[in-house]
Every structure is written in C-alpha cells, then in structure tokens.
Image: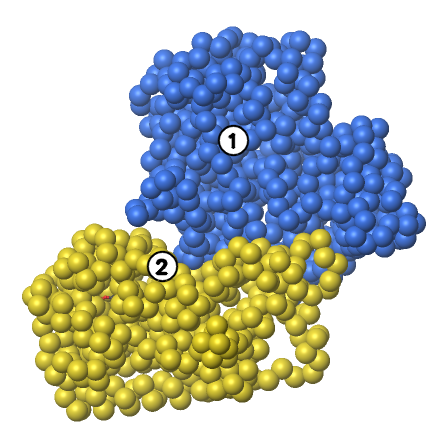
Chain colours: A blue, B yellow
Amino acid sequence: MNENIFTTVCPGCSIACGMYVREKDDGTFDIDWRKDAVVNAGKLCRFGVRLSANLMNATSKVDGNEVEFSDAVTAAGKAISDGATFVSVGNTTCAEHLALMKLAGSKGAVVNTGMGAFSSIPAECHPTMGVGIPFDAIESAKKIILFIDPYEQYPLLVRRILAAKKNGAAVTAVGWKAVSLADDNKTIDPANYESELALDSDSVIIAELNPSTDPERVMVLLNLAKASGAAIMFMKPFVNAVGCDLASKKTEQKSLDQIIAEINDGSIKTLVCLDSDLIEIMPDETAVREALGKLDNLIVITSRTSAITDVAKIVVATEPLYKKAGTIVNAEGRALHNSGEGTDGIDAIGTMLGQPVGMYDEVHAALLATLGIDAVDERVIPAYEKPDYAAMDANPTAEAVETALVYAGGPFLWNGMVDDNDFVEMNLDMVLANSLLKGIPAKITSDAGEAAVKFKVSDVAPGVVLSNVKLPMTTGMVTSVTVSR
Amino acid sequence: MEVGDCYIGWATDEDIRTRGASGGLVTAMLAAALEKGLVEAVVVLKKLGEFEAVPVVTSDPEEVKAAAGSMHSVPIVLSRYLDYGTKVALPAKPCDARSTIEQAKRGQVDIDTTYIVGLNCGGTMHPAVTRDMLDVMYKLDPADIEGEEIDKGKLIFETKDGKEHAIKIDELEEEGYGRRESCQYCDVNIPTMADIACGNWGVIGDLAGKGTFVEINTEKGIEILKNAIDAGAVEITPADDKGKAIRAKVDGAMMNVAAAANKKYLSPIEGSHLDYYMNALSDCINCGACKTVCPVCACGEGAKCTDFSSASDTYKMSLFHLVRFVHLMDSCIGCGQCTDVCPVDIPLTHIYQRFAVPMQEEFEYKPGMDMTTPPFFGVDLIEEGH
Ligand SMILES: Cc1cc2nc3c(=O)[nH]c(=O)nc-3n(C[C@H](O)[C@H](O)[C@H](O)COP(=O)(O)OP(=O)(O)OC[C@H]3O[C@@H](n4cnc5c(N)ncnc54)[C@H](O)[C@@H]3O)c2cc1C
Ligand code: SF4
C-alpha cells in the first residue's frame, strides 16, 4: 500500500482550515489533522472530518457519455463561443480562476463570481466586503456582533469567539436562532442597529456574503461599521471566494439570479461553470434545473461529481482541489498554497485558449502581483488597502411573512452534501400551535409543493422554520410556508 | 540476550547516528527490520518542517532513515496507522504503545506481527503552543529555529546562527506553555509494555548524546535488536549499574512531577456533576473528530456513541459523549488527541480522564500496560464457555 500525502485546505468554506489528504493507490482518500496549520491548528468541523465520505471525483463526459479528458477538453474548446457566460464562485484555485478569466477575456466576456452584491455596491466598498480581518483579531475584540450562527454556518469561528469571551469580550447575536455562546440574542430592526448595538473601534461585526445576500443588507452593515469604526468581516461560503474576488478585481459581475433570468429570456445560450454548481448553490433547485435545460451548451469544468455534472452537455473532469497546484485566499485574506502539483484544470483551460503550456506560471505570477507579494507565505497575511467609503442609502427587504422557511447555509448545504442534518428547527410555540408530535414528521407546504420533514425544537425566532438542507418546496433563501401535522 | 537485559546501543552508520536523537539506534533498528524482511512496513514521522511531521507507513528503508530524530512538537499517536495483519514496526511513545495494546485486545491489531519499539517520553508540545512560546518566552522567530532538545529539565532551541537558547520547562509550564496538559499528568515515561524500550536517560560518560539506552521487554524485542546487530546496522554494549540507577531515578522524579500535575488537573468534580458535564460539553458541534482520532476506539462507523445520538435530538447534553464516557472508561489512556483536534477547544482529554481514571483505579486496571489483563468491560469468551 502506498500513499500520497497532500498538504492542503478544507474546501468547505472560506475559513480554509489546514489539513492533510492521504490518497491511496486506488484513488480513495482520508483526511488527517495538520496540527501545525496556521489556520485553526488543523482543527476541522464535521464537514472537514467527513470530507472523504462526501467528495466524489468527476468523470469527463460529452452528451452524457464518458470520454477521455482530452476529448472533453477539445469538445469544450469548440463549444465555448463568443457570447458565452462564465461563472466561478471560488471553489477552485486562484490559478484556475485567472486562467478562466483569460479564456473569458478572449471571448469578450468576464468571469462572474456570482456575488451580485459587488455590482450593486460602490467599488470603494469592495475591499472591505472582500477581505476580512485576521481570525486572531476576533480573539482580541471587546465586542462581537454576530449576524451569522457560527455553530451551523462557520463552526471554526466558534473557538475564536469563545477565546474572545475568555478575554472579556461581550457577544451579541442578531439572527434567526439563539446562539448559545452569545451573552445577548436579539432581533433588531436594521434601522436601529447603530443605536441598539453601540459599537466602537474595538468591536468586530461578523456577517455573511453569499450569492443570495440582499445587497441592501450588506450596505446596512457597511454603514454600521463606518459609523462606529468597528471592523467588519464578511464570511463567504466558498473556500476561495476571496481569492477569486481579488483576482476578478472590479469587473462588472452578474448575480446568479441575473444569469438564470438571462438564460430564461434566451440571451445566454452557452454557460461555462468552473467548479460552480448552480443547482446546489441557488435556493430554488427546480427553477435552476429548468433554466439550465434551456441552454444550448452547459459546459462544466469541475473536480467533483455533483448535481450539475448530471445535466451538463460537456463535463471536463479535473483533479480534486487537494491535488491542484495553486493558491487559495481565505476569509482573512491569507494566501495558502497547496502542496499538490496537479495542473489538469489549468492545462484544460490553457488548451481551450490555444496555450497548452506555461499557463500556470503566467497566472500564478499575476496572482502574486495582485496580492503584492513575491511568494506565498501562509504565516504572513498580505497587506490590503481598505479605503474609506461614503455612507449609503439602504433599505433591506423586510421578510414580512407569517411563517418562513429559512436556510441556514452551512458547508453541507452549499456543497449539496447529505449529512445528519435532514431536519428543520422551530420553537416550541410553533410545535404546539400546529399540534406537531415527536416522531411524526412536520408537513411543510409552500406554493411550490410540500415536504414531510423531521423537526427539532430549538430557540429560533417566532414564525421561523430553520433548515440546514435544501428542501424541494423552497423558492428562495426565505420561503413563505405553512406548517401542519 | 535475554528479556530484562539493558544495553547502550547506536547506529553504525555515522550519518544516522548523528541525526538520531541519541545515537540513531531506533532508526537503524527499524530500517534493518525492513531491509532484512523482518517486517513489511514501518510507521515513522515524515518531517515537513521544524514543528511539523506526518505519519507515513512505508516499506522504503530510506524514508525510515530520513525520519531519524525526536520531534517534541509533533503530538501524534502512531498506532492509528497500523493495518491489521501487516508485519509492521513502529517507534512508540508510551501512548503509542499503550494504544497499540488496547487495540490488540479489541482485535484491531495483531500483536504477534507488530514490533513496538518503545521511546521513553517526558511529553510532547502542541506546535501552535510551541510557536507562541518561542515568540513570547524566547523572543525568537519560529522560522529561525533549526533544532531542539531537552536536557536537564531545560527546553533548548538552536537557531540558524548556531546559538542555543534554554529555558527551564517548569518555568515555561507555569506560564501556560511547554508540554500539553495530558503529557504533564501522564505517569508512564518508560514504555515497559513495548517490545523494547529506548531512551536517553541512563546514557552517561562518553556515550551521552551518542547512544541509546535499551531495555529488552519481550522475545520480539530480542528479535528486532538482534536482527539489526546481525545486519551490521547497530552496535551495543551492556548498560552499567550507574546508568541503570540514573535512569530509574529520573523516571521516579518524573513520576512525582506527573503525580503533582494529576492532583492539579484531575481533582474530583465539585458540585453538581450534571452541571459540570452540561457546561463542559455545551459547545460540542457533533463533528466526530474526537472519535475519529481516538487511538483506542475500536468501533468504526457503526458505533454505539454515534448510533445513540443525532443532530436532530433536542437533548441539552451530548448523548454522543455520554456514551463515550462509559465506553472509553476502560481504555482511555489520556493521550490528548481528542483535545488537540476539537474544533471548539473543549478540553476533552481532561473531561474523559476525570471520568475514566477513578474507574480505572476502582477496577485496578490501567489500560495498555500489558496483554495479559483483559479490559474490565471485556467479556472473557472462553470463561463464558463460548
Ligand atoms: C516526544 C518525545 C519525548 C521524549 N522524551 C524522552 C525523555 O524524556 N527521556 C528519554 O530518555 N527519552 C526520551 N525520548 C526518546 C529519545 O528522544 C530518543 O527517541 C530515544 O533515545 C531513541 O533515540 P534514537 O537516536 O535511537 O532514535 P532515532 O534514531 O532518532 O529515531 C527516532 C524515531 O522516533 C520517531 N519519532 C520522532 N518523534 C516522534 C514523536 N513525536 N512521536 C512518535 N515517534 C516519533 C521518528 O520517526 C524515528 O523513527 C523522547 C522521544 C520523543 C519522540
Ligand atoms: S467547512 Fe469551513 S470550518 Fe469546516 S473544516 Fe472546512 S474550512 Fe473549516
């Protein structure tokens, strides 16, 4: 038995916890703990621990038939026409993302990272929205405001917040569900954030930015940070979302919703997705599947098998992330280099561009220039400029529904992976009001259908049904529903 | 050569002898075991950095030779990498050796084909703590470190400019640095349960730093040492009484230090036990890392602790841990792996040891010390008439 050991990061979220992957002769792998990793001393959440059970390598395909990698690359090269639309949300290395940008550029297009908020918010805010603060800095904050549930969404932030509490920090959580480590759990009208939260320059705001985030909400939080002088950190669901955003600089970005709308109105005919499964990422799976079915060409360049590889016309299967040569930039802005030397993905994109060799060196040099560094050193975070920005007019949409099914997106949800999380959470009042009984699934009904789901009684806000998995009858991150037995 | 004999030994290869922690005997013995076909594989630590190494199972003697030297900031238990049925040898700190024995009792390791080359151990440090300690206590940049050793109770770092920087371990531990908590109260320093126990205690005179003190514990111990001598990889000389006495004295002193730490850290729980466990486990995120990394857990996927608990439970306390407290009370050796990997920094080893040690004392069973005593939860199938 021989093993190859890769020093890499967990692909589950933008924390990018350090880990080893032990790959055996037969291609199967196990994870192992990298205790000397700079990110979280190699500690991993359930997603990282169970990675090998959930990650399945992709297979190259054309029209549903398995083909050689090179044939898939040739077919993709031919099918990618001028006018194609490109998406890469940040599930792969900066090198592959930059190579795709080159390919897109050659077709007169840009690569969309799917974070629509970047296009609706002034460019001077982008550095603050993109790169967060060092995780160590969370530990020395005096006040922490959570607009996320760290336990479910970003579990490896929990230890940072607990360390801050030990150092005397006060923690307030503003969200759908009470967070047990918070000293105070609140529901606050965004108009009153400033007065009720009383932040200052020793405070840290932790929020999330994902493709479905309402830009107006981001603006409210940016305003709050500006007015108080607090540091703000937008966590992202995708491991290299920050790196891909930095690489993309200020190019005009379409939101994923916009892309789906343009597929539906016929203006997008060819879609190229680099390690970006819109069926998994977008809340309304049925609507996305319907739209993708209207494309002439759906070309997926990916390292793993997922819902989108089943419906793509062409799948170019690349090596898993842990094997790729290249760099990831995590939520802190820290550049982390893989020990792997795989260049399947880069070579594939290079070949489509007519540049089958030398692409890696070129794009890696471009990345270093973007980060302003000579070499990647995981222990030194590059210096990022965060210019001041003007306060904005912001009117976040109120979620005015009586009973709402809300997605609490964690690594399993964003990666469409099944886990021990096939249940919803609601508070005891809702359980009693709807005569739900332990052991009998709750029936959850929306305009789009119904589902019978196990439930758990938790301290969630009145009227909220919280889910960690995607349910078939949802139409958005928040869906109006009724609950019955 | 007989069980109970003590020798001072060293590698005949000058390079291995120099790179080895105290004479390279262990490396030479492991490499010779592979080269002569005594074993098919060896588990060693592949060095990736000054504070970073990853266990590898290798059949390449060169990889074994490259692994010479002790890494005090690599707190990993190697028994987890053993494959049932493979003829294998491993260097083993007492926790590596004890967990191998407990796994063997549960049918996960074939003790007859496993050569346990014991290493005395005074403790390991977590690499992240080592880095902080270098910064705060030694005022050194971790990137400048080129070597490290423990001598006369001091932790000494060598920097690239050839200078040595020493601070007393007691002083470091008072400031919260130094050895991991579980190593501080571990009271097994000499791996008597291994086939052969190797260390630097008791190596005196001209051989100090250039020889390894070896005690033969089993016939397999004789076999692996003789194999290396026959291969010309190792030379030995009988240990003298003075060396033996020094070794026993240092061991005794270390046991006293451990007993004091045991008192400090593992005192009985005061007040409500229910409150203690609820508070201690309140941040558990059900990740399963502690179970996966546990070197004495022999259950695999379909385990009682996971079968009896689910993320959808509304219980205010983790059933997963409650089951594990009971299930591990006759095997928990306090190796510290669960604490090291816990993503929410629950001091799990501390909590598990606080539960297990009183039970182990009650049943007069110390896990992993020998193959003859079955676990107190074990059912003796022969006695039961099966
Ligand atoms: C953490 C640690 C603490 C020790 N403390 C003491 C002590 O207090 N008193 C004493 O007498 N001796 C102690 N030793 C043993 C001593 O350092 C030497 O390992 C021993 O004398 C054998 O020397 P050698 O030159 O023959 O070994 P080498 O030829 O250098 O071979 C060492 C072997 O140990 C393996 N190894 C290195 N680090 C580790 C680790 N962290 N965990 C598991 N395996 C490892 C290597 O892969 C290699 O195979 C300790 C060893 C370690 C690893
Ligand atoms: S999913 Fe995120 S928090 Fe969990 S192990 Fe992976 S990177 Fe760390």
Residue located at (62% from left, 58% from top): B307
Residue at label 1? Answer: A305
**Mark 1: amino acid:** Thr
Where residue B287 sits: x, y (%)?
58, 55
Where, quadrant-wise, is the C terminus of chain A in this rendering?
Answer: top right
Nearer to the camera, B334 or A364: B334
- A343 w.r.t. B293: above or below: above
Residue drawn 33% across the image and 44% down it? A4
The correct choice, above or below, for B26 with respect to A84 in the image is below
Q: Outermost residue, right direction?
A: A433
Mark 2 lies within 8 Å of ligand 1 (Cβ measured): no
Query: In the rendered image, which quarter is residue B306 located in?
Result: bottom right
Left or right of B293 in this view: B213: left
Q: Position of residue A219 (x, y in %)?
A: 71, 35
- The residue pinned by badge 2 equals B84
In this picture, is B118 found above or below A192?
below
From this viewpoint, is residue B114 visible? yes
Is B92 on the left-hand or right-hand side of A215? left
Q: Quadrant of ligand 1?
A: bottom left
- Mark 1 Cα within 10 Å, few/some/many (few <14, many 20+)? some
Asked whether residue A398 is in view, the answer is no
A92 is higher (above) or lower (below) than A12: above
Tags 1 and 2 on a common chain: no
Q: CA distance from mark 1 to mark 2?
A: 32 Å
Q: Secondary structure at mark 2?
A: loop
Q: Amino acid at mark 2?
A: Tyr
Check the image and name the residue furthest to the front: B385
Chain letter, disc 1 residue:
A
